[in-house]
Amino acid sequence: MDGSALSAEALSADLLAMEERFVSDAAAGLAAAVELERQTTALGDEGLVMRARLCRAGMGMRTGEIAGVAREIYDVQQWAAEHGDRLLEARAHGQCALIQRLSGDSGRRLEHSLSAVELLDDTATVFTQIWHRTRLADALADTGAMDTARLRYRQAEELARGAHQWELLTILLNNWAHYEYECGDVVLAREVIGRMIEHADAHGLELDPPTLHTVGEVQAANGEYAEAEQTMLSCIAQYEAGHVEAVADLVYYRLTLARALRGLGENGRAQESLDACRELCAELGLQAILVQVHEEQADLHSARGDHAAAFAELKTFIAARESLRSQERESQAQARQAMFETAEAREQAERYREQARRDPLTGLRNRRYVDEELPALIAKDPRLSLAVADIDHFKRINDQLSHDTGDQVLVQVAKLLDAGLAAVAPRGFVARLGGEEFLLVLPATPVSAATTTLDGIRQAVGAHRWHDLTGDLPVTVSIGVAAVGETSPPSQSAALSTADRNLYAAKRQGRDRVVAGTPRERLPRAYRDRNRDVA
């Protein structure tokens, strides 16, 4: 194996490690992802570049660059879909779901989460299977569909236990408990927390502070204030010992500790913890958490019997909450705008692609479309038939009338061919190959049936009321038919050559007819290879 292949293999392994690793330090993770993108770009492997770009965009989103990376994530998703990279597309949908969560659109979040799971196949690792199923359960819970979410959580839990993915199982149970708590079912939240703790003890896992925080929240909500106090003190001790995933963690820990202490009636200590929260919020500019601090302060004033102070703090809380909601709406609008612009760009590109595959005069498919689509149709459909149709004496129409009239004849013949084929072979298509020549493709149609069908279309062309357009000049077509199975191996060029040969036979036999089955030896050259003096 050469050096470039080894480099590609090594980079792929590094990317997989990043894709399936829980990175606590987002800034360091972003720097590593940027370096991987640089290395894959230097290697020139587009698939690896796209994987690295998605990793870098995901890390960028964790550092707050939501609007900027949203476009890149959607571009990666589109690239993966176009190139058949199902696993990358699934990962991209997972990141799209995160964008939608941050923008507040739970419905679109669910759509992307479901797409991610549906795209997974046997090539996906066990970690990926569990991770995306957990994210789907989270998205379902976010819409309030807890019954369905619980089913998905149980399926993911079963997979995690079977694969001994103990760390991932811990995260799964933590998320499950969090959503039960958020949806107001503190009893079920406590039950899931109990399983998580039992699981961690059985496998020697130490719960990290963010996971312990969920435990503390649920304990406080269940009235287990003493237990919640000890849990939050443990979180704070680990944070102070250097276990820091985000600078805001300590604020959340002290806020939940204040709630637990208020529940225990230790209002003085609760106030001390709350004051520390307020100072940290001011120092770090954490307005979202400060709103919760105001709410807890109002509850603490009320617990002390100071209802006037509670009412004043409640008004402060309401004002702060409304200001925060306004800021969130602005952030959501920015994220949605980024997604809208990306979607618009994709739609515009698709429109351009469609235009490039259409004949501008007739609106039919063109030769480019035929060359892109026909080989695959031939490969998967041994009963496919095709035909080449040519307008008889078309040069005479151009010479005696005008080229503008000739164009009008082309447009009308195209309409008749397209309508006639759609009526009998809706899965087929008509294309203009050039000049006055058209291709008709009939899927799953034996050549005998195709010949009968095409003869009806030929008659419809000849019977059309042409007098208003061409006067006394008739408009008819000659058609040569071929079955893809007539040559071995079947191919586009061989089938078109056979159809051409039969078209030439139709011209030689008097025009305005359909011909199939002309032996090769009778005609030494295919019609497409002859000069256009035979019209």
Image (tube, grey):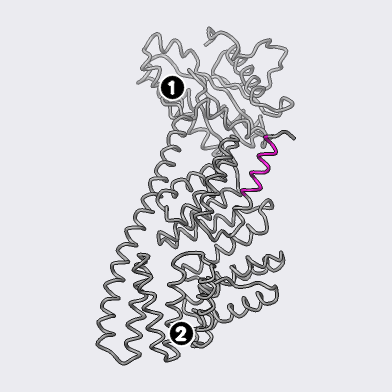
Q: Is residue 427 left or right of residue 158?
A: left
> How far across and how far down the image is residue 165, in percent?
68, 65
Q: Which residue is mark 1?
A: 410
Q: Residues within 10 Å of mark 2 (few under 14, many from 20)?
A: many
Taking the magenta stretch, the answer to whether it contains residue 245 is no
Q: Nearer the viewer, residue 418 or 30?
A: 30
Mark toward the viewer: 1 or 2: 2
Give the amino acid type for the residue marked by disc 2 in the picture.
Ala
Q: Residue at x 36, y 78 (%)?
A: 275
Magenta stretch: dominant secondary structure: helix
Q: Dot 2 lies on which element?
A: helix
Q: Nearer the viewer, residue 143 or 187?
A: 187
Expressed as whole percent of the image width and height from the top left, the position of residue 128 reads: 63, 57
Sooner in the amino-acid sequence: mark 1 or mark 2: 2
Residue, disc 2: 260
Hey, which quadrant is residue 262 in on the image? bottom left
Residue 40 circle label = none
Q: Can you give x and y, in whole percent of width and height, for residue 117 in the image?
A: 59, 57
| Disc 1, SS | helix
Q: Where does the image place residue 126, in percent across and percent down from the top left?
A: 67, 58
Q: Nearer the viewer, residue 358 or 460?
A: 358
Magenta stretch: residue 7 in it?
A: yes
Placement of the N terminus among the 4 image quadrants:
top right
Specify start and end residues of the magenta stretch as a single range: 4-15
Measuring 67% from the left and 26% from the top, which residue is drawn there?
Answer: 491
Would residue 493 be found to the left or right of residue 58 on screen?
right
Front residue (pair 60, 488): 60
